[in-house]
Amino acid sequence: MSRARLDGVKMLHHDEMRNYARIQSKMLEVLMKHGCKIVEPPSFADYDIYGQFFPHLRREMVKTIDADGSVLVLRPDATLPIVETAAREFPRTNQLLKFGYVSTVFRKYSGRSTYGKDFLQGGAEILGDPEPECDGEIIAMAAAVLAAVGICNIHIDIGTAAYAYALFDELSLDKEAKQVLRRYLGERNLVAYRGYTALLPLRSDCRRALDALPVLFGPYAETLTAARTYCLNSGMRNALARLEKTHQYLGCAGYTSHIRLDLGVTDPLGYYTDMMFKIYADEALCELVSGGRYDRLSTAFGIERPACGFGMNLNLLYEFMSDAGLLKDAEPSLQLAVSYSTYDRQLLIDLFNWRRRGFRVAAYPDTAYIDAGDCRLCCRYGDGVYHKDGNILTARELEEFMRRCDDGSSYCPS
């Protein structure tokens, strides 16, 4: 019985798994150097909570029914379940918590040549630290992860949702009008944004600041100077002053030349309160990392706790690294494949001896097909000896061939 193919669902193969394991290992190493404890976020969460913070994802969330009849979702985000669990397991509001993770997130994504219904996400969350230096550490940590996998030619766009929020507080507009402004800003739809602001009843200074907001982007120093001229209240000035401290932190970390300022950023996830950032690499079609500060998210779970974090889609990172030639070359899954007509005790002993010494070996009946690309060396076993290209080899000679294949120091039989 034939069935339609489930689009966006695929299996990862041997070489992909090797490279994903390498990326994950490098990432976790960086996170632990910054003092993060590695955690696995809960797989399931309450649908209503996610619907509150991710209303735009309601239709594509993967839902299931719990035994008590409540609707659950497979996590479409890692931050929310970490914050919720931390509120329950670590109720002291002044306790500093630093978590790192690599976990599957269940929502759609697409890149240049890849797409799917779930992806591997890695990231870090620092809970309990309200300082701008914490924002700097999150950004530096994310940049260090990219450097660890060979991506050093980056630029970092930083901004702050607090600047726009403080400007909107100055406007005599209802909630719906402000949401429209945020949507156009998020879409970078300058034509629609300008057309909409032209219809709004605004003071001249408010209109001037509002029209400038989407183009407050570029080199850090000159953009900051321009942004100061549009400040209408202490909230806007405080947002820029805080951003300055984060910039100073990043300067000490060596990232001054990589930073651009973008004050037209908006909050796509609905919970960022202050600093927001994205990290791009040359030739990448989208950001490799994004994150920011979300000081009010934990209050949804009864704990007031400031927090800052970042996340990266490792599937898109993998795609970029593949295009940039940063992945390890394909490697056969076996160093030795042995075909046999009769499986005997001596063959079994040899196989286990080789595996104890760290070699990847397997035996299969000579009636089975094995792809030659899956092994470096093939031979046939019979009557207690190994046959290769008309030669008889001992188990020790085969082991020596496998060792030479690995280090490339000598002839490896084809």
Image (spheres, rainbow, N blue to C red):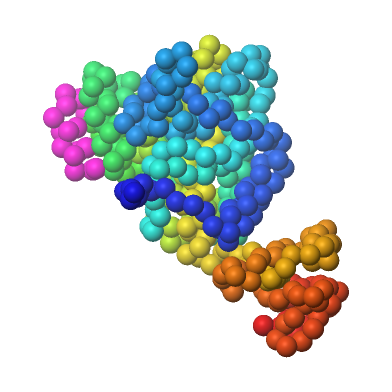
Place of residue 139 in the rendered image (x, y in percent of width and height, measured from the top left): 56, 42
Q: Is residue 204 left or right of residue 334?
A: left
At 66% from the left and 14% from the top, the residue drawn is: 92
In the image, residue 48 above or below residue 14: above
Does residue 24 belong to the magenta stretch?
Answer: no
The one nearer the camera, 252 or 266, is 266
Does residue 198 belong to the magenta stretch?
Answer: yes
At 28% from the left and 41% from the top, the residue drawn is: 187
Residue that lies at the very extreme toward the left in this rendered image: 199
Q: What secondary structure prevails in the magenta region?
A: helix
Place of residue 238 in the rendered image (x, y in percent of width and height, measured from the top left): 47, 27
> Magenta residues?
189-204
Residue 146 seen by the camera: yes
In the image, residue 76 above or below residue 31: above
At 59% from the left and 68% from the top, the residue drawn is: 368
Q: Is residue 193 left or right of residue 10?
A: left
Place of residue 329 in the rendered image (x, y in percent of width and height, measured from the top left): 59, 68
Place of residue 305 in the rendered image (x, y in percent of width and height, measured from the top left): 57, 19
Which image quadrant is residue 49 in?
top left
Which quarter of the image is occupied by the C terminus? bottom right
In the image, residue 351 above or below residue 139: below
